[in-house]
Every structure is written in C-alpha cells, then in structure tokens.
Image (cartoon, helix red, strand yellow):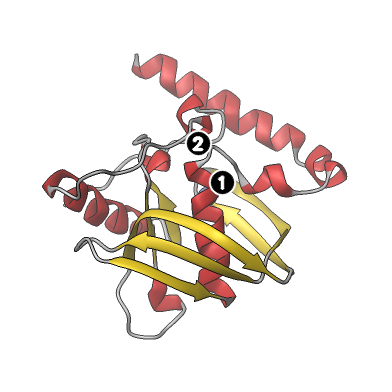
Amino acid sequence: MALLEIIKYGNPILRQEAKAIKEINNEIKTLASDMIQTMQAAEGIGLAAPQVAQSIALVVVDVGLISEGEKPVAFINPKVLAAEGELVMEEGCLSVPDVREEVVRPEKIHVTYQTIDGKTIDTWYDGLLARVLQHEVDHLKGIFFVDRISTIKKKRIKRELKRIAHDELERIYQAA
Ligand SMILES: [Zn+2]
C-alpha cells in the first residue's frame, strides 16, 4: 500500500475524459487500495483516479460515512443513467483545497458500476452517497464542482482558484 499524490485544480490531467477499465487486474486492485488509503489520510470521503494522475474510470467512496461500519468501496466504470429531484449541498474537493461551495445536484441517481470483484451493480442511490458519487463521476469527465456553481459565486473564488492552479503548475514544472 502506498500514499499517492493528489493533483490539484489547474493540472491538465483533471480536465481529461477518463478511459473505461476493460480488465480489473492486480494493477487496478492495487491502485484502488492505494486510493482508499490516500483518501483516508487526506480525510476525504471520495476520490477519483484522475485526482491521483490516473485518467481511468475508477473512484473510491468512504461509504462508512453513509452506512455505519462499512469499509470504503471502489466503483469501477460508474455511470449515472438517470436522476431525480434536486438538492443543495455544500461540497469541497481534495483537488481544490480550502474551497467549499453549495452545489445543486439531483437528489437520487440511477447508477451502474462494477465492483472490484467484477460484479455489475445496477441500483439507485440517494443522500450523501448519491452526492459523493456524482461529484466523483464528474471528475471522470473532467468536471469540477466549481464548474457547477453560479457565475457570481465563481467570481468570488476566482482568485483562490487562480492561486491553486498557479501553485499546481509551478509544482509540475519543478518536478519535470
Ligand atoms: Zn473532487
């Protein structure tokens, strides 16, 4: 197990469309468990593979926060097929540190995904799990939660976003 580096807003990888996973091999399983460890160390409740610089359709969610006693779970190739209702909730993101904003999203979602054991799940979620999954599935499409807030709100955090992107690009160039 290893802690992975979480890349930040401004990193071009986070704007790419993630590729579907064709085979759940050991590499994917290791990545999923590393992502769970990384998410927990960062005190997050969800993490998408692009956030650790892997542009593939894998997300992990700490479902223990949603149903007590359950371990974090990997969702492979998650897709939102349908949605119902509307709910305002405050969101944050490990790739957009120190920014929290209210986001309007559907309340319930119909999703399909594969488990780490390759089982296909087809179900509806609501509550916090629906919220976290929508946020993470957005990451697989290159979308940030700050793309879903009003123009007025986005103006208010413009400087903050610029600072995060600037620091991230500086870090990339220093690493290169
Ligand atoms: Zn996020």
Q: Disc 2 on helix, strand or loop? A: loop
Residue at 19% across / 50% down in the picture? 24
Q: Nearer the viewer, residue 2 or 15?
A: 15
Q: Nearer the viewer, residue 127 or 113?
A: 113
Q: Earlier in the sequence, mark 2 or mark 1?
A: 2
Q: Quadrant of the C terminus?
A: top left
Q: Residues within 10 Å of mark 2 (few under 14, many from 20)?
A: many
> Disc 2 designates what residue?
8
Disc 2 vs disc 1: which is toward the camera? 2
Q: Amino acid under label 1?
A: Pro
Residue at 42% across / 56% down in the picture? 78
> Disc 1 designates what residue?
97
Q: Position of residue 160 (x, y in %)?
A: 69, 37
Q: Is residue 127 above or below residue 7?
A: below
Badges 2 and 1: C-beta atoms under 8 Å apart? yes
- For this orientation, the residue located farthest to the left is 26
Q: Position of residue 151 (x, y in %)?
A: 84, 41
Q: Does residue 44 show up?
A: no
Q: Is residue 111 left or right of residue 35?
A: right
